[in-house]
């Protein structure tokens, strides 16, 4: 998460998504440890006693609470739908030429997303289109 939050190409949307995903994973890890599923923690022994597991679960719960408190400003940040998808809800009167251009841009964006999905699925990595 630390590395994902570094760089020049960050905006307000990316950190919110990165932190929210990490916080959700903390609860998932807590639940998995509580069920004695240690695939996320390969060094954690299956022979741990229940008291140790309770300590680990409590630690993950404390981390979750701490992250919610520390990043509350990011979690409260409301991002309008038009920022996430500017072409989805155009409710303004526009010229026919501009409307055609918006349709073309939206189609190009859809094609780009489809190409990225295909590259990820076929080659196991995200392409740089």
Image: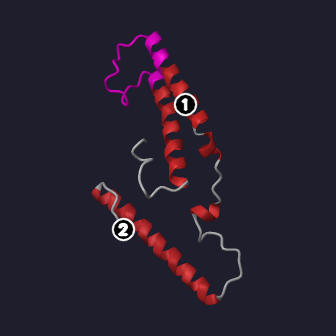
Q: Quadrant of the N terminus?
A: top left
Report, in whole angstroms, how far the alpha carbon at label 2 lies from the one at label 1: 35 Å
Q: Nearer the viewer, residue 79 or 111?
A: 79
Assign a secondary structure to mark 1: helix
* Residue 22, percent from left and from top: 48, 39
| Nearest to N terminus: mark 2 or mark 1 | 1
Residue furthest toward the front? 8
Q: Main secondary structure of the magenta part?
A: loop
Q: In percent of the image, x 64 and y 49: which residue is there?
A: 77
- Residue located at (42% from left, 21% from top): 36
Residue 97 drawn at (x, y percent) = 60, 89
Measuring 71% from the left and 82% from the top, which residue is drawn there?
93
Is 39 magenta? The answer is yes
Give above or below for 35 relative to 11: above
Query: Which labelled disc corresponds to residue 64?
Result: 1
Element at badge 2? loop
Q: Is residue 107 left or right of residue 7?
A: right
Please state the total of marks drawn on the protein image: 2
Give 9 or 104, whichever is nearer the viewer. Answer: 9
As drawn, 82 above or below 91:
above
Q: Is residue 72 left or right of residue 20?
A: right
Q: Quadrant of residue 115?
A: bottom left
- On the image, numbered disc 2 is attached to which residue? 129
For the record, the magenta segment spans 33-56
Report if residue 48 lies within the magenta region: yes
């Amino acid at each position: 998460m630390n590395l994902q939050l570094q760089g020049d190409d960050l905006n307000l949307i990316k950190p919110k998504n990165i932190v929210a995903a990490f916080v959700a994973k903390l609860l998932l890890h807590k639940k998995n440890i509580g069920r004695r599923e240690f695939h996320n923690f390969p060094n954690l022994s299956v022979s741990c006693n229940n008291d140790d597991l309770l300590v680990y679960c409590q630690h993950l719960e404390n981390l979750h609470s701490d992250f919610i408190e520390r990043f509350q400003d990011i979690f409260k940040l409301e991002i309008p739908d038009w920022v996430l998808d500017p072409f989805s809800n155009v409710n303004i009167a526009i010229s026919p030429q501009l409307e055609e251009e918006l349709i073309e841009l939206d189609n190009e964006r859809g094609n780009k997303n489809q190409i990225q999905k295909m590259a990820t699925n076929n080659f196991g990595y995200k392409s740089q289109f």
